């Protein structure tokens, strides 16, 4: 592990957001690197100072009285009204139960995929794991995927817009081979994972934070996309928007 790789993960280590394997790798590096050990000590002192500071605020009693004064008095319901409301609530709950279960399962599945995406991103940052094909030429990277995946992912050159294409590789997410297109923004690596989906429905992009990394995800043209990086959320969103605009422009052209 290099100092650049370790420094990306120091905050996640302090916050307990790394799995055991990555935590051990960072700790092993720190044990032999005075620079990173000093940086970790600085971050920990900052964390202690913030925790020790009295930053809580108790609202005055006058505020509670003002709020209570604006809330109309609620009459106590009788027993029949309570039972009627309970029966209606039970019926609604029964109708909605299947939908709620589906939402929970879908959320759990998305969280699992995001966890695997972040793990794949972290693996790629190890020496020799970032690219299988190293090239800034989209006409070299895209053909490299042919025959390796059911559908070759679109590859666009965004160098002129501040996001440098540096290559691609095969990776594995959810027990499936996926394409990973690799870009760089200054010192930040962006992994764009692409998988085929049965649906051609367009899903608007959204940005989430998972284990200290930002993930920009969207679906378009029968493909799912996940862009993951330690890049700031607004810049990662900009990257996603530029990539989508470029692929749509290529499709229309």
Image (cartoon, rainbow, N blue to C red):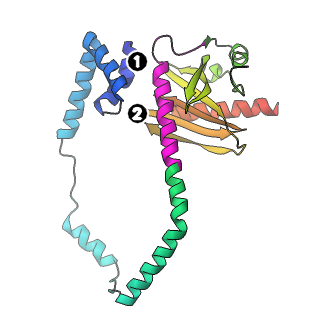
Identified at 54% across, 32% down, the residue is 236
Is residue 222 visible in the rendered structure shown here?
A: yes
Which of the pair 89/175 is nearer the observer?
Answer: 175
- Looking at the figure, which quarter contains the N terminus? top left
Number of other residues with Cα within 10 Å of mark 1, as a class: few under 14, some 14 to 19, many 20 or more:
some
**SS of the residue at dot 2?**
loop
Tag on residue 121? Answer: none
Identified at 22% across, 37% down, the residue is 50
Provide the residue designation for mark 2: 212
**Quarter occupied by residue 59:** bottom left
Which of the pair 55/40 is nearer the observer?
Answer: 40
User: Please, what is the dominant secondary structure of the magenta stretch?
Assistant: helix
Is residue 34 visible in the rendered structure shown here?
A: no
Q: Is residue 90 above or below residue 109?
A: below
- Looking at the figure, which quarter contains the C terminus? top right
Q: Please give the range of residues in magenta.
A: 106-132
The x and y percentages for residue 64 are 25, 69
Which of the pair 62/192 is nearer the observer?
Answer: 192
Furthest toward the front, the residue is 175
Sequence-wise, the earlier of marks 2 and 1 is: 1
* Number of numbered discs overlaid on the protein picture: 2
Provide the residue designation for mark 1: 5
The x and y percentages for residue 116 are 49, 32
């Amino acid at each position: 592990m290099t100092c650049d790789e370790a420094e990306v993960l120091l905050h996640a280590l302090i916050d307990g957001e790394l799995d055991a394997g990555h935590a051990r790798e960072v700790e092993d590096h720190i044990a032999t690197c005075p620079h990173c050990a000093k940086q970790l000590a600085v971050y920990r002192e900052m964390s202690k100072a913030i925790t020790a500071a009295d930053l809580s605020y108790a609202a005055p009693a006058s505020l509670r009285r003002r709020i209570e004064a604006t809330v109309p008095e609620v009459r106590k319901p009788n027993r029949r009204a309570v039972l009627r409301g309970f029966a209606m609530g039970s019926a609604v709950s029964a109708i909605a139960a299947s939908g709620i279960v589906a939402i929970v399962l879908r959320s759990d599945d998305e969280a699992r995929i995001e966890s695997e995406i972040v793990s794949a991103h972290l693996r790629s940052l190890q020496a020799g794991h970032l690219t299988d094909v190293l090239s800034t030429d989209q006409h070299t990277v895209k053909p490299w995927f042919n025959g390796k995946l059911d559908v070759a992912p679109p590859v666009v050159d965004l160098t002129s817009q501040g996001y440098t294409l540096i290559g691609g590789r095969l990776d594995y997410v959810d027990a499936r081979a996926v394409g990973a297109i690799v870009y760089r923004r200054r010192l930040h690596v962006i992994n764009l994972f692409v998988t085929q989906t049965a649906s051609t429905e367009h899903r608007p992009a959204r940005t989430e934070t998972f284990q200290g990394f930002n993930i920009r995800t969207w679906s378009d043209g029968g493909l799912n996309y996940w862009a993951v990086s330690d890049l700031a959320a607004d810049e990662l969103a900009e990257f996603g928007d530029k990539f989508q605009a470029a692929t749509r422009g290529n499709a229309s052209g």
